[in-house]
Image (spheres, rainbow, N blue to C red):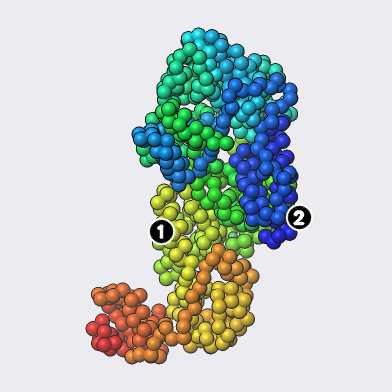
Amino acid sequence: MNTEQARERIRKLREEVERHRLLYHSHDAPEISDEAYDSLFHELLRLEETYPQFRSDTSPTTRVGGDPLDRFEKVRHASRQWSFDDIFDGDELRAWDERVRKWLLKAGVMTDPTYCCELKIDGLKVVLTYEDGDFVRGATRGDGEVGEDATRNLRTIQSIPLVLARPLSMTVIGEAWLPEAERARINREREAAGEPPFANVRNAAAGSIRQLDSKVTASRRLDSFAYDIDSIEGVPVPDTQIGELELLRDLGFNVNPNFRRCTTLAEVEEYYREWTDRRHDLPYALDGIVIKVDARNMQETLGYTAKAPRFAIAYKFPAEEATTVVEDIGIQVGRTGVLTPVAHLRPVRIAGTVVSRATLHNADEIARLGVRIGDTVIIRKAGDIIPEILGVVTNLRSGTEREFHMPDECPICGGAVARRAVDEKGGRSSVALYCANPKCFAVELEKIIHAVSRKGFDIDGLGEKIVEQLLNEGLISDMADIFDLTEGDLLPLERFGEKSVANLVAAIGNAKKIPFRRFVYSLGIRHVGEESAILIAEHLHELFPKRLAGLKDIAERFPSVTPERWAEIPGFGEKSGRSLANWFNDEANIRLLGKFVEFGVETVFPKADVLRKEGVFSGKSIVVTGTLSRFTRDEAKDIIRKNGGHPSGSVSAKTDFVLAGEDAGSKLSKAEELGVHVLSEDEFLGMIG
Ligand code: ZN
């Protein structure tokens, strides 16, 4: 991105972030989720950091939201309602723990802190005031100092006690929340009434509580959890957070039962991991956990910074939505021949892993989303679910985006494309495109398996079954795509665990640097096997007197080599010459080479004489057959090359030797028939000394 593009992107991001902020805070009608909003907000922050010359006092990054609306009566909170600082990973957690310990030591506290871990409910924070045990006022948090009076609406929530078990005067902090099923029900009603749906449960809870008509609120099954005592009269404040939760429960509040006392940081991390996995099993939404120093006296010692309490922290779960750019749209041909468009994304971290692919299903889905190549999109990945594109941030378009159309011919085999109506879930029907060539999938599968095999890219853990799965899921459509895969692409697949994914991604990374001859072999060019690839490598210097610098040169300079020139390589004939020239003059193949370059594959070119040294077999053609006892056939071929010889696959009158092991079959008989010299393993070893 150049400076001018950055300035334009910053300007558009500001407009878009501000628009969504207003929709959220002032109209209760967000169009995108909080996480997608955060993703845009953070891109803006990062750009403003990189390009400080474009900073501005009116940028939305200079302001934090929460202005109360005028239509509700405002309430000034008796004490400031803090929000917690957020952390996102284990390093930040350890840093916070260290700060807590240091601060306590400095204050002369000699005991180690223990922590109370609680679930962080994704709802609307509420402040509940009781006088002599009666519920007298409920307010939203607002900006922390001034909230909105929502007493009438909060009364409708069954789990908020109207009279406490004891006649206490106190202020209690809690969270009002709405079950996902209830949000779905409300959204159906809203859509039927022509109103915009709620984007998530938090907005649905907020929208339900900030309702002028409390009958509407009452009709919605809101629930609540209480988790903190802000002030209390007549009885001492419990001396731990856990004691507070227990008192709240005894007084009649709904207290989430999943809190846990943790004495070590390892236990805190275990709690976090456990709930990262279990969060989708609950009727309420979570966006993280809250960790508080349990002892009240320690909390008081630690106190507050200008922004937040020092004694507590919110440890957020990995975001399940983010924004990124669609860099390309590819076509995947599945096992059944169906053509499926797949978005190739600028790699983006979601739910803890990096994702680079998302299926677009079919032409109808592309039309529904209105997605174009180059668009900024919102992408979601929850739990074990395959990532999906939720929508396009059309206001960020620069005008260079391109529309995508389904192809008329199969991008893999070039064959005709057929149309067939299919029924989808929900009774809708749509048109699917098929490649009419029944062998199409199998051919591409074969090619990719050949490419990653031991003599090619040699990628550990990428067996036939897995290649088939990747191809069928649309994660790859050709061999180059393998090098664009990320952990997040693979994790949702069956058979893949975190460890096997990490191993495979590492193996793919290692395979990116490949000797030239193995790269040529992996391309699977007809009549160009392992030995031909080595011959090309050996004669590169004659074919290209000006040294080749990289894979890019292969794409640029190989197409100009004529079939006749290829055929001049010793051991080559007309057939291999034509095959090579055809391959390097096919546009689709040049695109494939371009993708290898783009995904960071590098070929290592041989120095003049590394592959084959002068030796006892110089100029000799040798066929290896049967089972050898001292080495494998491949090892024998390497020995032949290192001694100047040319291993060959078939016996002919031109063959100089046949090295025959146990159970040698037709090749041995042919050698005997033609009178070719047959070598035993001992004779062979004797020759090379
Ligand atoms: Zn096809």
Task: Kindly check if marks 2 and 1 are in contact, taking CB atoms under 8 A apart as contact.
Answer: no
Q: Is mark 1 within 8 Å of ligand 1?
A: no
Please tell me whether mark 2 or mark 1 is closer to you in this view: 2
Dot 1: what SS? loop
User: Residue 114: horizontal and vertical position, in percent?
Assistant: 38, 33
User: Residue 485: horizontal and vertical position, in percent?
Assistant: 52, 57
Dot 2: what SS? loop
Q: Which residue is mark 1?
A: 461
Left or right position of 108 against 329: left
The residue under the point 57% across, 36% down is: 306
Tell which residue pokes out farthest to the right in this image: 399
Whole-number angstrom distance, CA of label 2 to CA of label 1 = 42 Å
Comparing 299 with 425, the one in front is 299
Residue 595, by quadrant, is bottom right
User: Residue 609: horizontal and vertical position, in percent?
Assistant: 43, 86
- State how many labels appear: 2
Tell which residue pokes out farthest to the left in this image: 682
Q: Which residue is mark 2?
A: 399
Comparing 246 with 525, the one in front is 246
Say which amino acid is labelled 1.
Gly
The residue under the point 62% across, 61% down is: 411
